[in-house]
Amino acid sequence: MIKKGLIGIMILGALFIVINRLLGLSERRIETAMSYVTYPLLQFQRFVVHSFSPSYKQGIVHVLADLEKVTLERDTLLNELISLKALQRTVEDTSDLRDFMKRYNAQSLVIAPVLLRNFSGENFFLVDAGENFGIEKDMIALHHNMLVGKVTHVYPSYSKILLITDPHCYVAAVCSSNGVKGMHHGLKKGFTTLAYVDHRDQVTVGDTVLSSGEGGLFPRGFGLGRITDVDQGGYGRSITIEPSLDLKKISQISIVPHTFTDEASDSSVAEELPLKPAES
């Protein structure tokens, strides 16, 4: 087919030469004019021959095979990267809890993932640890050396944690700067308050509120929040506290017995917490 096309081109070229000679055109002009007609045809012929040649077909097959191999390797590496990132995230999320385990001699500490959060009405977590993990009622929940709440219900596979932002979760607390004491409990919209504070005590905005350890349930020296507002009006003083933790973002907590031994708090925390001045 290609040969017939070339023969046709040659015949047309010969006719063109004869016609142009009859018209008296120079040989140079004839050749130049013919080149404009011949060049596209030559390029087309080269493309056709090259496209259907065995070497070209083999080249395409090899390129496609290499592309498939590279794509497979890319997908494998991508899956490995995703797995490594997931592992890294798990390590990062539990780093503070592991530091806590090193600092405190809590032999029965359990790291529990949060299964469900509820902030409508009662504030609580359901966590993935229950009787099967040795969890018991009144154990405390911690995170980043700050209080999360206490265990109120225990089931074989999971437990319910009443959060410090719940109005029924009371924690004996102390202001870190001057030792003023009160009872910490939850308010609406995620804030908390410090109640039963002597009206003669000075409470400062920005002060940090910690658990005092009184009452025997919650250990002392764990963070609760920061005072954001103090209403000094009369005896019914209102103290608003912003919790130290964003409980909506916590994914894991640690659960320990309320009687665990805190070697660090026995010394360092006691020195860090100032005592309330004696009244004269």
Image (cartoon, helix red, strand yellow):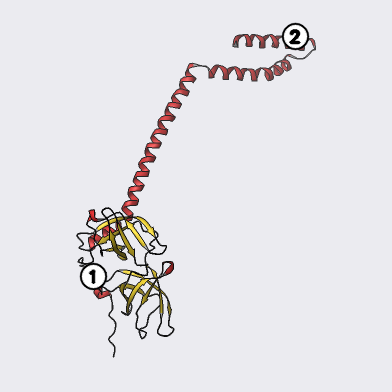
Residue 126: where, in percent of width, then height?
33, 57
Q: Is residue 157 above or below residue 205?
A: above
Q: Which numbered disc, 2 or 1, marks the residue closer to the eye?
A: 1
- Mark 2 lies on a secondary structure that is helix
Residue 227: where, in percent of width, then height?
39, 74
Name the image quarter holding the N terminus: top right
Q: Give, as a three-letter code, the residue at label 2.
A: Val
Q: Give, as a three-letter code, the residue at label 1.
A: Ser
Q: Report which quarter residue 182 is drawn in.
A: bottom left
Any part of residue 205 in sight: no
Name the image quarter holding the C terminus: bottom left
**Residue under the image location 36 percent in, 77 percent down:** 195
Q: Which of marks 1 and 2 precedes in the sequence?
A: 2
Residue 279: where, in percent of width, then height?
29, 88
Question: From the viewer's perspective, is 232 left or right of 219?
Answer: right
User: Circle 1: is it few (<14), some (14-19), or many (20+) Cα within 10 Å?
Assistant: some
Image mark count: 2
Q: Name the residue at the right extreme.
A: 23
Q: What residue did someone put label 1 on?
A: 265
Q: Name the residue at the bottom extreme.
A: 280
**Residue under the image location 79 percent in, 9 percent down:** 22
Q: Is residue 102 above or below residue 230?
A: above
Residue 107: where, in percent of width, then height?
19, 60
Q: What residue did someone put label 2 on?
A: 18
